[in-house]
Amino acid sequence: MKRFCTVIMALLLSVFTIFSATAAQVEAAGANRGTMENADPGNMIVEPVDLGLSVKWASFNVGASKPEEYGVLFGWADVTGKKTSISNDDYPNANPPKNISGTEYDAAHVLWGGAWRLPTRDEQLELVEGCVWEKTELKGVAGYRVTGKNGNSIFLAASGGRVGTEVHYQVSGGDFWSGTLSGNTDEAYYMWFYGGRQAVEDLPRHYGFAIRAVCN
């Protein structure tokens, strides 16, 4: 069973109690949800961080203004950040492109402009396999410090994931879309961390996940 379904079942069995979350973390979660107002940085500088990989990673999520903020949970190929439909045909249609990175369907590219774009599946795998992941907190927000071989790092907040309008396991884990469609066209690849593990897998395109952009 895929990780997302396992997490949802665990949450139901525990009556939606938050795994390993302190009261301070829960309070911080409520204060760090993103908005579309922050999705266009305007005069805000988005710092690209060189982790010694093939691409540079943004220092915070799309829809955030600092690393500890969650940003917006986007459906795959939804640049508005507002869709909550559970029909895959709405993300963006019944015959989606194989790769939306850098296209009109890429929220990072559309909202931030320039060279910013969604990472590909391979670029997310490179982050998972080529860096050291350490569970930590930043200003009371739970997440992971991801450190490259050159010693530079980024912080990924535990922003959770959304199905329809319901956000699950915020504070406990995080999901981040890639721009790469799965072999099963109802799904796309995403990077996740939860329970001390991290990986890249595929899930339905209508799920709402955070976006951590990259640039060359």
Image (cartoon, helix red, strand yellow):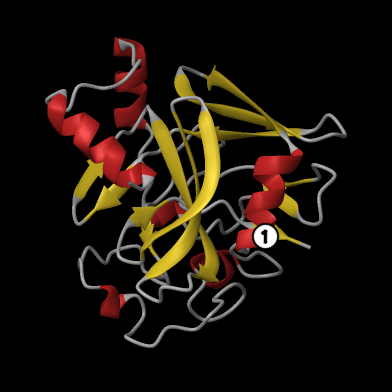
Residue furthest to the front in view is 1
Q: Residues within 10 Å of mark 1 (few under 14, many from 20)?
A: few
User: Picture coordinates of residue 12 (x, y %)?
Assistant: 14, 32
User: Picture coordinates of residue 82 (x, y %)?
Assistant: 28, 64
Which of the 4 image quarters holds residue 117? bottom right
- Residue at image location 51% in from the left, 81% down from the top: 104
38 over 193 or under it: above or below = below
- Residue at image location 56% in from the left, 77% down from the top: 99
User: Picture coordinates of residue 111 (x, y %)?
Assistant: 52, 67
**Nearer-the-camera pick, 151 or 191:** 191
Which of the 4 image quarters holds residue 22? top left
Which residue is labeled 1 in the image?
122
137 over 107 or under it: above or below = above
Q: How many marks?
A: 1
User: Picture coordinates of residue 43 (x, y %)?
Assistant: 62, 55
* Left or right: 34 as drawn, with respect to 9: right
* Left or right: 87 as drawn, with respect to 31: left
**Nearer-the-camera pick, 125 or 179:** 125
Q: Helix or strand or loop: what does disc 1 sit on?
A: helix
- Residue at image location 33% in from the left, 46% down from the top: 1
Residue furthest to the bottom in view is 95
* Left or right: 199 as drawn, with respect to 5: right
- Residue at image location 20% in from the left, 68% down from the top: 85
Residue 46 showing in the rendered view: no
Residue 197 showing in the rendered view: yes
Residue type at the position of mark 1 = Asp
102 over 163 or under it: above or below = below
* Left or right: 6 as drawn, with respect to 99: left
